[in-house]
Image: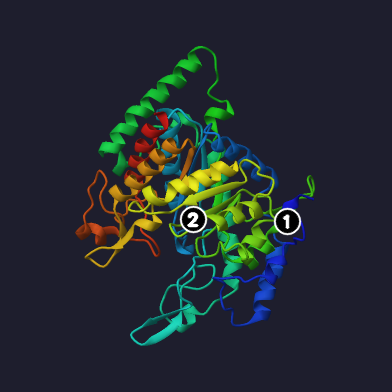
Amino acid sequence: MSSSQTNWTKSSWKDFTALQQPNWPEQHAVDKALTNLATLPPLVFAGEIRSLKTLLAKAVTGDAFLLQGGDCSENFSQVTAPNIRETLKVLLQMSVVLTYAGAKPVVKVGRIAGQFAKPRSSDMETIDGVELPSYRGDMVNSSAFTKESRTPNPKYMLKGYNMAASTLNLLRAFTRGGFGSLQRVQAWNQEFVANSPMGRSYDRLAKQISQAIGFMETIGISSETPQINQTQLFTSHEALLLQYEEALTRQDHITGNWYDCSAHMLWIGERTRQVDSAHVEFLRGVHNPIGVKLGPTYDLDEVKKLVESLNPENEAGRLTFITRLGMKQIEKVLPPLLREMKREGFNIVWSCDPMHANTYTAKSGHKTRNFNDILSEITCFFETHWSEGTIPGGVHLEMTGNNVTECTGGAQNIGDEELASNYLTSCDPRLNAEQSLEVAFQIADMIRS
């Protein structure tokens, strides 16, 4: 047993303070749902999780780049084949840009097949004098502002499992059944992107890749090799609902280690990463790759304690720090963090979340993010790593394959007044497909340099 599992069981988190948990009205209904979950098959498998950890170890040394992206909060109503396909498509496009233009292997991790729960700043929400429980994601309750909708329902955890299983089933079919083949690299260009500046840039790159594949076939290298006609996509979500995560934690019969089989990678949010929290206690004992969100108010001593708790053996690929610092503060607060972690010799994948600390409310009343702010934080993230002699290892984006108008700016130059035209998110504003592709081209330039 590794030191990370000392005095640990999959239920030992219950002896610690668990923030951001639902106030379930009936415990017997919760117990019944969890008993059912514990008997269901794992959503992902230990061997897949170990493969991801091996790939992430390469991002520690700069020999690979982590692309993590997807919905801010998945909705059950949006778990449809077209939506899953479009999200996968834009992730594949971004990966191709980063791999080919950036000349670096890309580890693709979706915020998908499980991102059904969300933290909230308050347990209750008041509208027009009426107070009801806050919406905590479709795995807990519904967003409609009624007592019935807002009452937490443990049956939604089972529905979340089924939705995740359906999503994974389709993703596996797409990534292994030809949809993810590099021979389709031009076909991934969506119509609304193909007619845009980013779409035309992507099309030029796709033609170069198609020519390279044609050359390989000419000299006798088959395009049916897995490296060309298949791709790997891993899943991730914030490990927020600890009862759900515990129910899907299983012991691997090969290694004897425990894995949270709800997703390949789990992360701890900014609100729940206290060293003595239930979330840290739970995740220190599972052998998945773990992410930790770090905001600008981090405490260096606390961060070091987090590393020692979550990755006591300093295993490369185990721990990813996802910094969400804001374009106005990153230049000031990132350097001391990098210096101290480098001085300690910690093996960390450094990933940039340029979304969460750059949110503001537009004049129209919509919560939004400006594309230039997002790009500024990413650029400063890279430049700071270069100046400190550390490795910028990845990016973490809230994005969608649909043509939404939720973030301002970008090649389309979406203005505040245009946000309402296709503002679909139930949570945070997401980059649309064209904005996501534009980010990928900009990052590729920085990776290559």
Q: Is residue 363 left or right of residue 243?
A: left
Residue 117 visible within the image: yes
Circle 2: residue type = Leu
Looking at the rendering, in which quadrant would you find the C terminus? top left
Pointer 2 residue: 294
Identify the element where label 1 is drawn.
strand
Q: Mark 1 or 2, which is nearer the eye? A: 2
> Where residue 126 sits in the image (x, y, percent)?
39, 82
Task: Give the labeled residue for mark 1.
Answer: 250
Where residue 133 sits in the image (x, y, percent)? 47, 79
Q: Residue at x 54, y 40 (%)?
A: 175
**CA distance separating discs 1 and 2:** 28 Å
The amino acid marked with disc number 1 is Arg
Give the image quarter of residue 207: top left
| 404 is higher (above) or lower (below) than 11 | above
Residue 43 visible here: no
x and y, in percent, of residue 297 in the image: 45, 60
Label 1 Cα crowd, 10 Å radius (few <14 / some 14-19 / many 20+): many
Residue 212 lies, with reference to residue 236, above or below; the image says above
Residue sticking out furthest to the bottom: 129
Q: Residues within 10 Å of mark 2 (few under 14, many from 20)?
A: many
Q: Residue at x 33, y 45 (%)?
A: 375
